[in-house]
Image (spheres, rainbow, N blue to C red):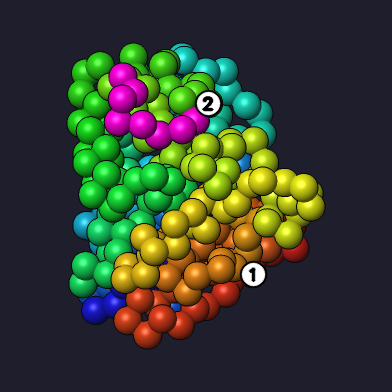
Amino acid sequence: MTDYFIGDLQGCYDGLQQSLAEIEFNKGKDTLWLTGDLVARGENSLATLEFVKQNDSSIQTVLGNHDLHFLSVANGIKSKNPKDKLEDLLNHADIHQYCDWLRHQPMLLELPNNKGYMSHAGLPPNWSTEDAVYYSSKLEQILRSKTYIQFLSNMYTNTPALWSQNLLENEQLVYAVNGLTRMRYCSKEGTLDLNFKDSPDSLPNDSELIPWFDFDNQRFSKIKWIFGHWASLMGKSSNPNIIPLDTGYVWGNYFTILNWQTQETVKVPAGINKL
C-alpha cells in the first residue's frame, strides 16, 4: 500500500488520469490524498468531481477555497465566474448530490503515522495544531448542518485578520476558514494578508509580509504540513517539513505527486494546450 499526495486538481480530469497512470495507482491498495480545490479553472470539473466522489474509498481530500466557492455559486450566494468553467457541473441534474458530498469533506486531515497534517492553505499564525484540529471540526460541523448556506453567505470577508481568543464565535470561524483555505502571507505579528499571491521572491524590498510557514517555525520542528493553494511557490518552501504541492498544472506547469513512503516526487507536465 502506498499513499500518494497531489496538489490542486482544479478540474483537470485528463491530467489526473495521466498522473494516476504514471504512478500505476491501485485503487484496491493505494490511497490518493488531495489538497483541495477539486474544481474550477480546468477543462472538466464535472468529471473530476465525479471521479473523486465515486472513488472516495481510495481518496482523501480536504476542502479548498474553490470548492467552497462552488458551493456558494450552486446555492445562489455568489455569481458564477466564466473563468471557472463550472457550467456542466452547475447544470447537472444531480447538482445537489455533488454539493452534499463536497460539504461533508474535511477541512483538515492527519497525515499517515501521525506525522503532521494537511490543509488547503496551511496552519494559520498564532494557532497550534490543536487549534487547527478544533476549529476545523467546528467548520465541518457547520458545513454538514442544515444551516451551512447561512455560514457560506457570511464568510466572504477578510476580517478579522488577526487571531484572538476574544473574537466572537462567528469571527473565529471566518478567520478559521480564511486561514485554512485562503491564506498565503501574514505579518510578523500574525495578521493575515489575503491579497498578495505571488512568490516570496516577488515581495517588494520594503514589504513586512512573510509566508505563513515562516511564522513561528518551531511549530513545524517535529511535524510535516502538506498544502496546496499557492501555485507560485512551485513546490518550494524554507522548511523541509513544509510541503507545498500545488505546482500550477492548470496554468500549464505540472502536477507534483509525492510518494509518502519513499518521499520521492513525480512531475506530470501539462499538455501544450493547457491554459
Residue 120 in view (yes/no)? no
Whole-number angstrom distance, CA of label 1 to CA of label 2: 34 Å
Residue lying at 63% horizontally and 46% vertically, measured from the top left: 209
Give the left or right position of residue 160, taking residue 102 as reference: right
Q: Residue at x 67, y 46 (%)?
A: 208
- Tell me which numbered mark, 1 or 2, is placed earlier along the sequence: 2
Which residue appears at 21% of the width and 72% of the height? Answer: 113
Spot occupied by residue 54 in the image (x, y as percentages of width and height): 29, 50
> In terms of secondary structure, what is the magenta stretch mainly?
loop
Foreground: disc 1 or disc 2: 2
Image coords of residue 46 (percent x, y): 47, 41
Magenta-drawn stretch contains 27: no
Which is more toward the observer, 4 or 219? Answer: 219
Q: Which residue is mark 2?
A: 158
Q: Report the front residue among 86 and 242.
A: 242
Q: Which residue is mark 1?
A: 269
Q: Which residues are magenta?
A: 161-168
Expressed as whole percent of the image width and height from the top left, the position of residue 203 reads: 74, 51
Question: Where is 214 relative to 43, above or below?
Answer: below
